[in-house]
Image (tube, rainbow, N blue to C red):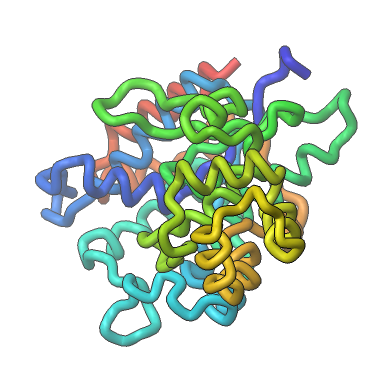
Amino acid sequence: MADRRPLLLLDSASMYVRAFYGVPDSVRSPRGEPVNAVRGFLDAVSRLVAARRPARMVACWDEAWRPRFRVAAIPSYKEHRLAADRESEDMPAELTAQVPVIVDVLAAFGIPRVGAPDAEADDVIGTLATRERGRPDDVRLAVEIMTGDRDLFQLVDDAGPVRVLYPVRGGGGPQVVDQGHLESAYGVPTGDAYADMATLRGDPSDGLPGVTGVGEKTAAALIRRYGSLEGLLAALAGGDPGLTATQVRRLTAAADYLAAAPGVVRVRRDLRVGDVADLLPRTPAHPDRLVALAERWGLEGSAARLVQALADAD
């Protein structure tokens, strides 16, 4: 398996949002519409294909950016990102208008785009990575996940292997996040431990309050000491003397949150995602359509770069 090229899973929204803010909005179509997110997204995919040379690739998609099951568990989940209509996500109109173009270009290339009802791309990624881990050793591929979302660090597993490719500031290749990186950067040994630490710590960017007064270092130390969030809560219930009076008070006060949060923080791995035709296309599936899209939106250079990267991905 070590010699086989990986399965590359793209956290598409993470990538095109990053492209939107990272590529100047002066990048425009022949008619003057912004296409900075489209170009940045395509160029990022080209660089990934050239560097990682995947055998298979899927653009994973948010069908629901704020799934009902997560909101039911913790109503504050991503609440601060709601638009004025209290339904859709508050996103710049210039970015929203570019998403359908990305959809059309992916289809023209023949790169599969996979989502699932009431699920985020994270859940699709979790499901596809877990499915790949369950394949026989002689056909199983390493899984690489391109994302700017640290939530997906919970899937890291050297035994898979499942690794995250995380963008770094200043350009250059992404950071390869494996268990060694989790240990050195966060003080936790596994992806599962990272999820438990993140539950305790919380995440204001997702509307998850965490346990008051428990930051990342304290959360990691507690998970290391007790092995898991479940182990920590069992120690709390049993009156373990290793917990300070302050920790007992804070954990007890957060009991309702800690009962609900794991189902929100942990990505789903059991979505009903059918078989995916995910072999890396070596040539565009619909070349005439791709040419028309490239001309309409001024994407000739980005499209050509991805065509070349796919052709060279031996």
| Residue under the image location 29 percent in, 41 percent down | 39
| Residue under the image location 30 percent in, 64 percent down | 96
Residue at the bottom extreme of this rendering = 85
Where residue 59 appears, as percent x and y from the top left, is: 54, 47
With 205 as the anchor, is 141 left or right in this view?
right
| Residue under the image location 39 percent in, 22 percent down | 173
Where residue 277 appears, as percent x and y from the top left, is: 70, 45
Quadrant for the C terminus in the image: top right
* Viewer-nearest residue: 268 or 235: 235
* Residue 136 found in image quarter: top right
With 292 as the anchor, is 260 left or right in this view?
right
Where residue 166 appears, as percent x and y from the top left, is: 44, 34
Asked whether the viewer can see residue 291, the reply is: yes
| Residue under the image location 28 percent in, 66 percent down | 91
23 relative to 3, above or below: below
* Viewer-nearest residue: 199 or 94: 199
55 relative to 240, above or below: above
